[in-house]
Image (cartoon, helix red, strand yellow):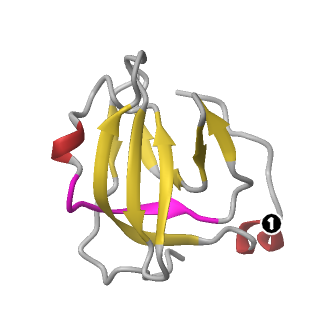
C-alpha cells in the first residue's frame, strides 16, 4: 500500500472542480501504447483529455461512460494534443486501473 501523501487544507480541496462528464469520443494517440485522446462533454461544453489508460481499455469501450474529471488543472500538451481535463480512476498495487463510473446527471459536481 502506498504511503499517504502530504496533507492539504480543506480550502485546497475546495479549489478542485470535479464534475461528472460523458465520454463522447475516444481514440488512440498515434505511436503510443498507453495514451488515449478522449473528447468529453462536461455539461458546459466539450473538452479534450489525454489519459494513459490505453493499455487496459479499448477506446470504443469508453464511449458513453460518465466518469468524474478534474476540470480546473492547468492544461498540458502531450504528443501535440492539449489536455484540459484529468480523468479520475483508481489503481491498485498491481497497476490495474478501475474507472469510477457514475449514472449521475451530466455536469454534476463531485463533492
User: Which picture quadrant has residue 71?
Assistant: bottom right
Quadrant of the snapshot with the C terminus: bottom right
Q: Residue 64 magenta-drawn?
A: yes
| Vertical placement of residue 70 versus 76, above or below | below
User: Which picture quadrant has residue 78?
Assistant: top right
Percent across and percent down for residue 15 are: 75, 71
Residue position for label 1: 12
36 relative position to 83: left or right: left
Q: Which residues are magenta?
A: 63-71
Residue 87 seen in render? no
Q: Residues within 10 Å of mark 1 (few under 14, many from 20)?
A: few
Q: Residue at x 41, y 15 (%)?
A: 31
| Vertical placement of residue 96 versus 18, above or below | above
**3 or 96, which is in the foreground?**
96
Percent across and percent down for residue 19 are: 49, 72
Q: Residue at x 61, y 46 (%)?
A: 82
**88 or 6, which is in the foreground?**
88
Q: Residue at x 43, y 63 (%)?
A: 68
Q: Residue 25 magenta-drawn?
A: no
Percent across and percent down for residue 103 are: 23, 74
Amino acid at each position: 500500500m502506498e504511503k499517504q501523501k502530504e496533507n492539504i487544507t480543506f480550502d485546497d480541496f475546495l479549489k478542485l472542480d470535479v464534475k461528472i462528464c460523458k465520454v463522447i469520443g475516444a481514440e488512440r494517440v498515434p505511436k503510443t501504447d498507453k495514451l488515449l485522446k478522449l473528447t468529453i462533454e462536461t455539461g458546459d461544453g466539450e473538452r479534450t483529455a489525454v489519459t494513459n489508460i490505453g493499455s487496459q481499455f479499448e477506446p470504443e469501450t469508453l464511449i458513453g461512460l460518465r466518469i468524474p474529471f478534474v476540470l480546473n488543472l492547468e492544461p498540458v500538451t502531450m504528443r501535440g494534443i492539449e489536455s484540459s481535463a484529468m480523468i479520475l480512476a483508481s489503481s491498485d498495487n498491481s497497476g490495474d486501473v478501475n474507472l469510477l463510473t457514475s449514472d449521475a446527471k451530466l455536469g454534476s459536481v463531485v463533492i
